[in-house]
Amino acid sequence: MDNLIALLVAAPLLGAAVLLCGGRRLDRFGHWIGTLLAAASFVVGAVLFADMLGKGADQRALHQYLFSWIPVEGFQADVAFQLDQLSMTFVLLITGVGTLIHIYSIGYMEHDERRRRFFGYLNLFLAAMLLLVIADNYLLLYVGWEGVGLASYLLIGFWQHKPSAATAAKKAFLVNRVGDMGLSIAIMLMFTTFGTFAFGPVLASTGETSEGKLTAIGLMLLLAACGKSAQVPLQSWLGDAMEGPTPVSALIHAATMVTAGVYLIVRSGAIFNAAPDAQLVVVVVGGVTLLFGAIVGCAKDDIKKALAGSTMSQIGYMILAAGLGPIGYVFAIMHLVTHGFFKAGLFLGAGSVMHGMNDEVDMRKFGGLRRYMPVTFITFGLGYLAIIGFPGLSGFFSKDKIIEAAFAKGGTEGWILGAVTLLGAAITAFYMTRVMLLTFFGEKRWQPDAEGHDPHPHESPKSMTIPMIVLAFGSVFAGGFFSIGDRFLNWLEPVTGHSHGDSPVSATTVTAATMVVLVIGVAIAWAMYGRGPVPVVAPRGSLLTRAARRDLLQDDFNHVVLVRGGEHLTRSLVYVDHTLVDGVVNGTAATMGGLSGRLRKLQNGYARSYAVSMFGGTAVVIAATLLMRAV
Amino acid sequence: MTGLAAAASTTSTGEAFQFWVLGTVAVIGALSTVLMKKAVHSALSLAGTMIVLAVFYLANGAYFLGVVQIVVYTGAIMMLFLFVVMLVGVTAADSLKETLKGQRWLAAGCGLGFGVLLIAGIGNASLNSFNGLGTANAAHGGNVEGLASLIFTKYVFAFEITGALLITATVGAMVLTHRERTERAKTQREMSQERVRGKHLPPLPAPGVYARHNAVDIAGLLPDGTASELTVMQTLRQRGQIRDVSNESLADLKALEQRSEERLGRDQDEEEVTK
Amino acid sequence: MNPVNYLYLSALLFTIGASGVLIRRNAIVVFMCVELMLNACNLAFVTFSRMHGNLDGQIIAFFTMVVAAAEVVVGLAIIVSLFRSRHSASVDDASLMKL
């Protein structure tokens, strides 16, 4: 069974190679190749999963050693895979949701000339993400990490003829570079500290290392996670990434990319456990992003951008949970999986709506679509109920656990974190209800598109609806399935560890509080958008609303602080270079030149001048001789 | 010369007198060698100094060297100098004005320092007594015999090599002053044949002949008044630098007439004014 | 009088000769000054020979004379050929040691 692991990566990688190198002759059926290979990867994952279930909890981790990548004395980098319960969870999520998105894309990208290339990139994305989660050392993980960055760049900028898409891709890539820098520094630190970067030895020897070093490594890992998972302060690329085709957004937000950061933190749990300071920063980042994303989500009229804000917020939940330590690891992953289902469903639903509405994205120009797109309405609705945490659906279980874990952190921190997560839940309920109401309820506010065609909303083809239905099932039942009998907890505990903490409030109280804030959020949204007509053009809104529409001024902040600051820094560096460095260099040169110019005059070509020098020299020699004799 | 082998501390009074008188002459000679404007005078002063030095050699018991000094130095080398001076130009007087900036001051400073140091060094060395050459000269029966025995025994190799050096110097001097001919010298016969076969039997006319102007770049006039190019050097002819003055006198005349007219006109005007 | 006075005279003549080399521009005079320096040395050698009662000093003086003769021959030949090509015997005119 061990030898099957490589197949997980190999299948989509083969697909990417074939599709990208195959040329136009594959145009007609290339998308089937891509989908089949993604599905093949899923089948391999399922087989491995079945095999894993048959074993005891201790023997479940599998290893496969392929070859030695960089064999240098004292620096051993292997291409080797490790498939334990944590990796298995990710593999199933990535390949499962990924395959569904492939199927969906067949319909969604039907009219695109470059569909074959699109599927090639999708396969590349899957391969990179799979490599990331099954690598058995940080260096190989880094390869996957960069691969994910590359694939996301290619996919976000897939419609590169649009300048906005090209810019968004570049922005995502650049912001990701900052995080990548963190990961590479973390790996270097690991190597100097532990002498290796394989998961096993590194995580086992955290006890023998000073806390300062571990904190440094942890903070660098967090920086990496912030870049990939769009956490504050590296969140700015996520909203713009909506310029890519909708399946890409679904893939980035649900199954791949943004989950990489959560995976990294949970995988490096041992490091964070031993570095409480780093852990605290993780929690703070998670909490801030949670509220940040939620607030942005409230103000956006673009359906995809509202969902993007929601993703940021939900990932914030996961990061926060991961920062709680053993109390939260399992729930972070559980929320990640359930979020994978319902967020993929929501994005595919949004894509379906856009598909029917001539690629319109402004929710204020939707309205009353529930009768025209029943399947989309129902699947999207189920996803909506799941994300706001409607009792019984998957979001309810996973989010509730995180809120409980936040309270269980204990002390003042626990109360603050609990309050933040509850507030986040309320805002989530508000903005998701807003999305739902604006899109599917109320009167029609449809506008003709740029060419004057009135939209004719219609249900999407089967290839699009079936994945949505499957994902809707996941959204509804996954949480319950995982939670009943603590199945998920028992499954992951051998890898991540778990502790219950000591919650100051009982689980029932937390659930009740969650229900209350949920109702409040929904009620406010209903009061604002459900009762009366909604204006097609957005009102000016309060200062906060306007700021939130501009992504809470993230780009302005970046521009003022980073771009301007960078420019000023560069300018001052150039100034220093011109005056100080060049001054020293030119000054030395000028001094030498001047001295040489003076000295050159001694070399005047007149034999008599030279003779004087010789004569003077002789006199000096005589003087020295006499002096030495006298002494 | 007097005592045999006994270390003495003074010489005879006669020698002392001779030293002071001739020493002064030697220093004056040396100074005028350096300071005389004409090379001939320098050479003569130097010859005088050398003769004085020859006397000093004799006084010091170096009879052979004293004679050689007169014969070789004063007789041969200084005459060679004079010969070269004649070749270069006896009358040519050097300007003693210094052209290199600071050269004279530096030279004076260095010379003064050097001399003071040298004299201080000699003064420092305790040379209060001397042996005299009596014993050494007597060993082989005389000064010349003593030197001969040293040269042909102890210094024989140096002596032979010196011979080689002299030969080399002679050859070198010949090589340096020898001029290589670039073409075969014409015999008298060839030259006369060339003359007869050429167009002009008599010598070429000189420039300016029959003309009012005798500069070399002005062609002479033939009796009929035309200019003859033959009278001008071939080089100038080929460069086209022959000046034609046939019109200059006319232009001069014109200018003179104009000037006199102006003057006369002005005088007339003045006269009219006075009238 | 002590023969050491000859040494002082020798030093004086040598210094005068050296200064002459530095001051004069005419190559022939410069050469004469060099000869003067050589003669001053010879005087010192002869004096030392007398002071030590040893003929070796005279031998050295003898060799010096021979070498001086050879040197004069070559040097004057150089001056003549220099004069031929430049019509000048000034040492400063040959300032070709400078680029």
Image (cartoon, coloured by chain):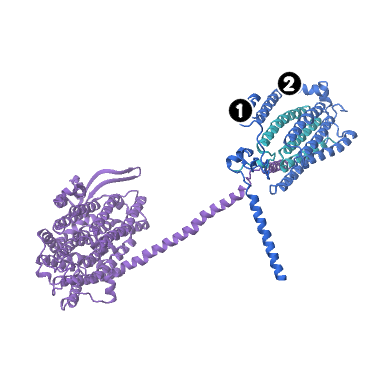
Eyeballing the image, is B113 above or below A241? Answer: above
Q: Which residue is mark 2?
A: B153
Q: Which residue is under mark 1?
A: B197
Three-letter code for the amino acid on which mark 2 is drawn: Thr
- A248 in relation to C67, above or below: below
Which lettered chain is shown in purple? A
**Residue at image coords 58%, 43%:** B240
Q: How many marks?
A: 2
Tag 1 secondary structure: helix
* Chain appearing in blue on the rendered image: B
Q: Residue A606: image x %, image y %?
A: 66, 43
Identity of the residue drawn at 24% across and 52% down? A128
Comparing B10 with C78, the one in front is C78
Q: CA distance from mark 1 to mark 2?
A: 71 Å
| Residue B127 visible | no
- Residue B119: quarter of image: top right
Q: Position of residue B101 (x, y in %)?
A: 69, 49
Colour displayed for chain C in the image of the structure: cyan
Residue depicted at x 64% and y 55%? B254
Residue A250 shows up from this direction:
yes
Q: Which sits earlier in the primary sequence, circle 1 or circle 2?
A: 2
A192 shown above or below A319: above
